[in-house]
């Protein structure tokens, strides 16, 4: 059965009080519309149409992709009018309507809904709410069959007492849609072309309306203001936390954990509070992440330990390696197995060999560091001459004394040592000691200055 999906995203979202179109506001680091598109794609439709209006140019620019067709709705004359804008493009057996500001809808729920659609039956997603104020109400006949949807503003008091509300999400046989939309009128309380009027038309034409409900009402919750946006965010994060816990992660506090991207985890991972994972993060078995860490687009191999307050972006940490507290691993950082990066150490485009160590207060940029090499506290690679970046290459088993400046380009060969406080500008051959500092002089009989008495 072929499927076309139409996502409505033309509305303004005044209550966000924002220059940004509502559907571009983020939940878990992705725009609300981005989440809906992500779910839509998983249904493998033959086409996805996004109806845009307010902020159309920006929405198109941000989300442009080969598999998306953007349709402009110049004036927002109602949800029925919005779907009608995409009509010329719709050819599939089934058309599914989604909303750009309802980001948490689950693919499984949509699959259940789609199963209901035949040439003589449509699928309507409804939700039963203690307070359905504002929602269209699902009107059922004596036999319990859906006969119509009545919008809140058009509803009688008796209809307002109905607690089953319309989520707006709907799947219909495509062949009938054009005819029904063509018959819509805007003769109602809001002067809009209501998509919901299609339900009564379908029933009059002899079709059956089958209903499904989401497993959790938050799936169909929209965000009209920033308070609702924050509620969606928290719900998403708890859901993500539960998913990871089910896979063998201990979260010290799921309420203080955020995922903004795609995370894969191994077993027996421990994540302390206030950790943010962003982009693509791979975490293997037995990894421990301390409190207050930000980890983006990084891979942590088996047994890695990231200590408190560390910041990782584009890093690969090899098996059993560790970093922090207060480590900063910038893009291009690779730590081989059991390498150690301590506190206040920054690495950028730096490769540390197996068991190499940089324990304290160091900057290593554009550097290759051999296995077992030890970098003393306060070592800086001078990788930038103001115009170009240059490389520092250290062999295996090198010992860099404390407070060194390694002026790139420079090579220090296997087993070499540098004296503390050196400014190294030339190659040091294997096994030799490089000393590059002023020689110490002691002045005999030196008198300290004395305070002048007044
Ligand atoms: C709609 C439903 C209502 C349902 C509720 C659920 C209709 C007539 N009513 O009401 O039954 O309970 O959603 O939240 O469908 N949009 C456009 N173009 C338009 C109008 C709307 O793209 O011309 C988009 C909006 O951006 C929004 C969505 O459609 O994403 C729903 O529009 P909104 O005005 O919020 O509909 P409601 O009045 O809430
Ligand atoms: Ca709404």
Image (spheres, helix red, strand yellow):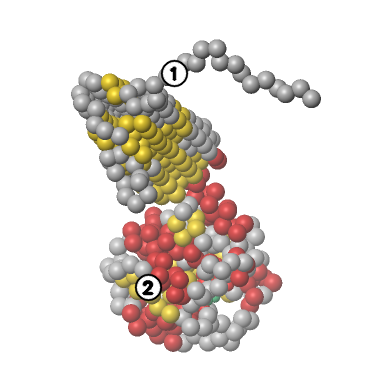
Decide which of tag 2 and tag 1 comes sooner along the chain: 2
Quadrant showing the N terminus: bottom left
Compared across the picture, whether 177 is left or right of 77 comes to left
Compared across the picture, whether 1 is left or right of 51 comes to left
Compared across the picture, whether 274 is left or right of 357 comes to right
Q: Residue furthest right?
A: 454
Whether residue 116 is visible here, answered yes or no, is: no
| Residue at image mark 1 | 441
| Residue in the foreground of this view, choosing between 92 and 146 | 92
Tell me the element at label 1. loop
Residue 195 locus on image (x, y percent): 49, 77
Q: Residue at x 53, y 87 (%)?
A: 185
Compared across the picture, whether 432 is left or right of 314 comes to left
Q: Residue at x 44, y 70 (%)?
A: 59
Q: Is residue 161 above or below residue 316?
A: below
| Residue in the foreground of this view, choosing between 246 and 436 | 436
Q: Is residue 277 above or below residue 86?
A: above
Q: Is residue 90 above or below residue 67?
A: below
Disc number for residue 49:
2
Which circle, 2 or 1, is nearer the viewer?
1
Q: Residue at x 63, y 77 (%)?
A: 154
């Amino acid at each position: 059965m072929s499927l076309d999906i139409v996502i409505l995203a033309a509305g303004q979202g005044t209550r966000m009080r924002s220059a940004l179109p509502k559907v571009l506001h983020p939940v878990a680091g992705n725009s609300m519309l981005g989440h809906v598109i992500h779910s839509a794609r998983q249904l493998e439709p033959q086409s996805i149409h996004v109806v845009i209006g307010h902020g159309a140019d920006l929405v198109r620019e941000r989300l442009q992709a080969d598999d998306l067709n953007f349709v402009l709705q110049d004036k927002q004359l109602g949800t029925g009018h919005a779907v009608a804008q995409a009509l010329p493009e719709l050819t599939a057996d089934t058309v599914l309507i989604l909303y750009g500001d309802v980001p948490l809808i689950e693919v499984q729920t949509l699959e259940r809904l789609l199963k209901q659609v035949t040439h003589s039956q449509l699928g309507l997603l409804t939700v039963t709410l203690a307070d359905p104020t504002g929602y269209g109400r699902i009107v059922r006949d004596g036999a319990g069959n859906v006969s119509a949807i009545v919008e809140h503003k058009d509803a009688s008091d008796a209809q307002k007492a109905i607690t089953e509300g319309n989520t707006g999400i709907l799947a219909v046989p495509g062949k009938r849609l054009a005819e029904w939309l063509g018959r819509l009128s805007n003769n109602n309380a809001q002067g809009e072309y209501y998509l919901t009027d299609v339900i009564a038309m379908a029933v009059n034409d002899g079709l059956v309306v089958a209903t499904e409900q989401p497993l959790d009402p938050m799936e169909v919750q929209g965000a009209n203001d920033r308070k609702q946006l924050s509620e969606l965010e928290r719900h998403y994060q708890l859901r993500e936390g539960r998913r990871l816990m089910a896979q063998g992660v201990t979260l010290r506090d799921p309420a203080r954990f955020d995922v903004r991207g795609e995370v894969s985890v191994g077993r027996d991972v421990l994540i302390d509070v206030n950790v943010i994972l962003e982009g693509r993060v791979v975490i293997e078995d037995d990894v421990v992440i301390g409190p207050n860490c930000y980890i983006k687009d990084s891979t942590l191999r088996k047994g890695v330990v990231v200590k408190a307050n560390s910041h990782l972006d584009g890093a690969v940490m090899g098996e059993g390696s560790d970093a922090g507290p207060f480590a900063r691993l910038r893009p291009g950082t690779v730590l081989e197995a059991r390498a150690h990066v301590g506190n206040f150490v920054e690495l950028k485009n730096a490769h540390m060999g197996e068991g190499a160590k940089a324990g304290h207060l160091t900057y290593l940029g554009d550097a290759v560091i051999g296995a077992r090499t030890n970098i003393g506290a306060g070592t800086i690679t001078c990788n930038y001459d103001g115009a170009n970046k240059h490389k520092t290459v250290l062999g295996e088993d090198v010992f860099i004394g404390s407070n060194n400046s390694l002026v790139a380009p420079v090579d220090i060969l296997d087993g070499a040592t540098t004296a503390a406080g050196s400014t190294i500008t030339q190659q040091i051959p294997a096994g030799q000691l490089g000393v590059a500092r002023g020689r110490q002089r002691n002045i005999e009989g030196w008198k300290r200055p004395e305070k002048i008495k007044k």
